[in-house]
Image: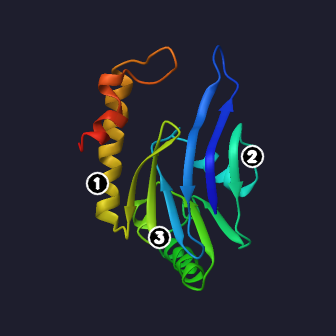
Amino acid sequence: MALRGLTCTYPGNPEPVQALRGIDLEIPAGSFTAVMGPSGSGKTTLLHCAAGLQQPTGGSVVLAGKELVFADEPTGALDLRSAREVLALLRGLADAGQTIGMVTHDPSAAAYSDQVLFLADGSIVDRLPKPNAGAVAARMASLVERVESAAGAGADAAGEPAAAFTWRARLAQGE
């Protein structure tokens, strides 16, 4: 699956809300990809656009002939044992060649994937290949801290956080 320049804008008052901001992404066939980010980061919108449930404002979604499984918080309301069973099923499907895309808030669930993509403000801001729960939790904590710091710094006219405090600038500096 390939996403090219994927954008999605929701009408808002008084300004439209940019849910996705030019996402460029390749998800290899037969892989298991988890998507994480703070609430409102665009995770579910990304999943809905990739699955064809929502029309993007711009860009394209290209499915390479393989069936995909999309899961939005598949373990959110399950007990621990049932959650493990669902995740093991998804992992087994990926190991058998099925492409899986999953949105989750749970670092333990994300650890079943081949890679974790982290979203903030509608953009992919980080990736973690071969994740484990501890590394995912640490990255999420750092990401949330950066997003909160940027939000506290205010925003410019386009709705972007002030340049000196954006998470994009801090990521580029290796923080």
**What residue would you read off at disc 1?**
138
Q: Nearer the viewer, residue 8 or 145?
A: 8
**What residue would you read off at disc 2?**
54
Q: Secondary structure at mark 3?
A: loop
Point out residue 172 in the picture as x, y percentages from the top left corner: 30, 40
Q: Nearer the viewer, residue 104 or 169?
A: 169
Report the Cα–Cα distance between label 3 and label 1.
16 Å
Q: Is disc 3 in contact with disc 1, using a CB cutoff of under 8 Å?
A: no
Q: Secondary structure at mark 1?
A: helix
Mark found first going from the N terminus, 3 or 1: 3
Mark found first going from the N terminus, 2 or 1: 2
Point out residue 164 in the picture as x, y percentages from the top left corner: 30, 23
Q: How is the image coloured?
A: rainbow
Q: Amino acid at mark 3?
A: Ser
Residue drawn at 36 percent across, 40 percent down: 144
Image position of 73 (left or right of 126): right
Image position of 8 (left or right of 166): right
Q: On the image, which quarter does residue 85 sit in? A: bottom right
Counting other residues with Cα less than 10 Å from the Cα at mark 2, is it few (<14), some (14-19), or many (20 or more)? Answer: few
Q: Amino acid at mark 2?
A: Gln
Q: Secondary structure at mark 2?
A: loop
Number of numbered discs: 3
Q: Amino acid at mark 1?
A: Ala
Q: Nearer the viewer, residue 66 or 46?
A: 66
Q: Quadrant of the C terminus?
A: top left
In the displayed structure, would residue 101 be above or below residue 42? below
Residue drawn at 32 percent across, 36 percent down: 146
**What residue would you read off at disc 3?**
113
Q: Nearer the viewer, mark 2 or mark 1?
A: 2
